[in-house]
Amino acid sequence: MVKVAVLGAAGGIGQPLSLLVKGNTLVTELALFDIVNTPGVAADLSHINTPAKVTGYIGDEQLPEALKGAHIVVIPAGVPRKPGMTRDDLFNINAGIVKNLATNAAKYCPKAFIAVISNPVNSTVPIVVEVFKQHGVFDPKRIFGVTTLDIVRAATFVSEITGGDATTTNVTVVGGHSGPTIVPVLSGTGYTFTDAQRDALVQRIQYGGDEVVKAKNGAGSATLSMAYAGYRFVNSLLEASVLKKSGVKECTFIKTDIAAAEGLDYFSTVVELGVDGVAVAHPLPPFSEHEKQLLGPCITELKANIQKGVDFVAKASASL
């Protein structure tokens, strides 16, 4: 039995993500949770002729049932970014939502792999970790911030310049998952770029989300590309943990000591996935001089983002 629970399944990311997961023949049960509309989404997806049995759950009272027995819990829940909104603006709304979902996951599926999509990821992942610690069930190998969209975008944008195949173009992206915390390691791609190309690529990879928010003109954020990226990460987890494939690697934001020298408890790096989640967190790659300059602002902002998540859980606990 391989159960995947999608929390926030009726939303702009949740629906296309659930559709992609339903198409994966390794999944035997797909549990869809949201505060509205999940019975309809579940009914719709249940007509697709793949093995996964689809169930819809609505409201907090049905959340435990959605989570029990889950192998993977994907969390795209929360509000999307609107024009002019920063990821910090999102924090005030999404932090409480993620904390509630994490509390239930810690109680009802403490051994599940938790894939956090809800922004701001730099803060929501520490929220999940702190909640799991409070419940005595934290395992650093099993909680992931999904930064895959940065990697997907980087491959697309680099291949547009090089003329290479986007599906085989591999760009390591480290740091975090917002603006200046996103550090694309273009020097490791094997391609040479002019300074102007490099600067434009870095800007576009860091702020690709803004491009979509602007283009959608108030009608949403990057939901479809995020669903694709989120599914890619879920599929990698399934290949490593269910099929026991070796060599499955993804960049992901995890609790790790690889950037401890910079005073950071979390960082996105290349991770080899295994049956228990993180098998190997690879050390940071060699950086060019330009990439070293990008790390300064990344580290400063990341420290503040991480602390914000940690403090949120501490304050919530103190007020109980």
Image (cartoon, rainbow, N blue to C red):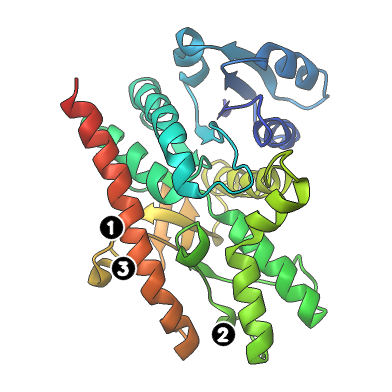
Looking at the image, residue 184 lies above or below residue 226: below
Q: Amino acid at mark 3?
A: Ala
- Separation (CA) of disc 2 from disc 3: 20 Å
Residue 281 lies, in percent from the top left, at: 40, 62
Q: Quadrant of residue 304?
A: bottom left
Residue wearing tag 3: 259
Q: Marks 3 and 1, how far apart in space?
A: 7 Å
In-image side of 263 versus 206 (left or right): left
In-front residue for pair 265/178: 178
Q: Amino acid at mark 1?
A: Asp
Which comes before the other along the chain, label 3 or label 1? 3
* Crowd tier of the residue under label 2, counting other residues whose Cα lies within 10 Å: few below 14, some 14–19, many 20 or above: some
C-alpha separation, residue under disc 2 versus residue under disc 1 = 25 Å
Q: Look at the numbered disc 1 and give the secondary structure of its residue.
A: loop
For this orientation, the residue located farthest to the left is 318
Q: Front-most of 242 and 115?
A: 115
The residue furthest front is 84
Residue of label 1: 265
Q: Crowding at label 1, few (<14), some or many (≥20) Cα neighbours within 10 Å?
A: some
- Residue designated by label 2: 187
In the picture, the quarter occupied by the C terminus is: top left
Report helix, strand or loop for mark 2: helix
Question: Is residue 223 something that shows in the picture?
Answer: yes
The residue shown at (51%, 40%) is 118
User: In this view of the protein, which residue sits in the foreground, 181 or 184?
Assistant: 181
Q: Residue at x 37, y 62 (%)?
A: 301
**261 vs 207: above or below:** below
Tell me whether circle 3 and circle 1 mark residues in contact (CB < 8 Å).
no
Where residue 222 appears, as percent x and y from the top left, is 68, 47
Asked if one can make out residue 191 in the rendered structure from this viewpoint, the answer is no
